Amino acid sequence: MNMIHLGKKAQVPAILISIFLICFFLAPLSRAQTGVAEDPQLVQKGDRVGVHFTVRLHDGRLVRTSRAELMKNKKAVLPWFERFQETEDYQAKEVIAGTKGAITGAPNLGRLVLGMRLGEKKSVTLTPEKAYGPKDPDLIKSFQLQQRLPRSVRLGPREFVDNFNVFPLLGKTVPWEPFFKSRIVRIKADYVELRALVRDRSRLKQDFGTIDIRFEKQELIADLKPRVGAPFAFRDLSGQVSRVEEKEFYVDFNPLPKGEPVIVELEVTSLTKASLFAPMVPFWIEDYAEGLEEARQREKPMVLVLYSPECHFCEQLLNETLKDPVIQALDERFVWVKINSLEDRALFDYYKQEGYPLTVVLNKDGLEIRRIDGYLPAEQFRAELEEALKAGL
């Protein structure tokens, strides 16, 4: 019994030594597999990358680009892109390799540049799920091919003004029906009468196709003949006819490029290795007046974080989001100020704070240019800061 017991005790150190030796010899192999040596010409995770990009549909129409020369052909540009044109600076954008990238309207740039080399160009096709997301089925609407409408209609005075934002004038035409105008034919104290400006047995040409009109007593029958792929507007929505059936047709109001595969063209124009900037952490000023003066002297916008030490989302924002390399890359672009507004109630009230955390971006003169309520992950927070930089120019 004693010999067996002693034998087991003797085996324990041998097992530990074996485990230690295995780990010792395998450790370099593991590091080689997971920690690839830094290559100054290769885009690797965490690197700061300058990239020119162009996003197109498969038919060549432009979704978004950083190249000004491609904007000359306005017919090839999707209306969706118009929202970016006023603030677009048309130059290479900066992303952190391995992240989604914080360039609004340009999907996954940070991930797409991984493995590219400085100066390299490439083209990648993305599925809808990896680009702008699938279509929203609620934005696909059906309409009847035949519509029966009254030839004339009476509106109360207030209803008329609410609809057209003008006072009625005899003989004036107004867009009462979606496909044609109506004329004011009678004005009384208690109503305004409109009559459709169409003829019996007539055909109207529309952007989406044609409408055949015929009268039946006091009704107007409109037979719509839409073309698949044609534009169709309804109220404040614009879409395309997606299919036509026996009694109805469908219009897809999902804005392009949603639900579409896209081609992304990339060119790496600059590369800063992660090792050169990863240690950077925003230097926090914890005095409001001092922060304003620093922003004024350095002529830089100020990021003001109003937090509570008792707030979990504040802790996430300060210790995760703002320490992420995506945000660290902007360190020198701002003056960073954090204030415990649970104690400083004057700032809580001044900025009309409703919850924690609140981030306010001020220009160099101390004027508010953007407000970020609550917690955001790093990439979304950076996108907000990028917009603030544009607004503060």
Image: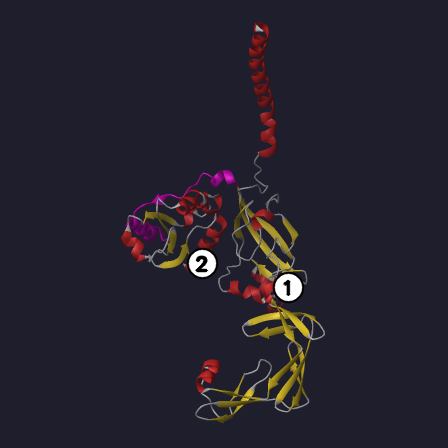
Give the percent coordinates (x, y) of residue 366. 33, 56
Q: Which mark is residue 390?
A: 2
Residue for badge 1: 61
Viewer-nearest residue: 41 or 304: 304
Viewer can see residue 342: yes
Answer whether residue 295 is magenta in the image.
yes
Which quadrant: the C terminus? bottom left
Counting from the top left corner in percent of width and height, residue 300 is at 38, 52
- The boundaries of the magenta stretch are 273-301
Residue 144, picture quadrant: bottom right
Amino acid on which the number 1 mark rests in the picture: Arg
Q: Amino acid at mark 2?
A: Lys
Residue drawn at point x = 43 percent, y = 50 percent: 375
Where residue 96 appears, as percent x and y from the top left, is 53, 46
The answer to which of 366 and 137 lies nearer the viewer is 137
Which numbered disc, 2 or 1, marks the residue that appears first in the sequence?
1
Image side of residue 35 versus residue 290, left or right: right
Q: Nearer the viewer, residue 170 or 52?
A: 170
Tell me the crowding category of disc 2: few under 14, some 14 to 19, or many 20 or more residues within 10 angstroms, Cα based. Answer: few
Q: Quadrant of the N terminus?
A: top right
Q: Secondary structure at mark 2?
A: helix
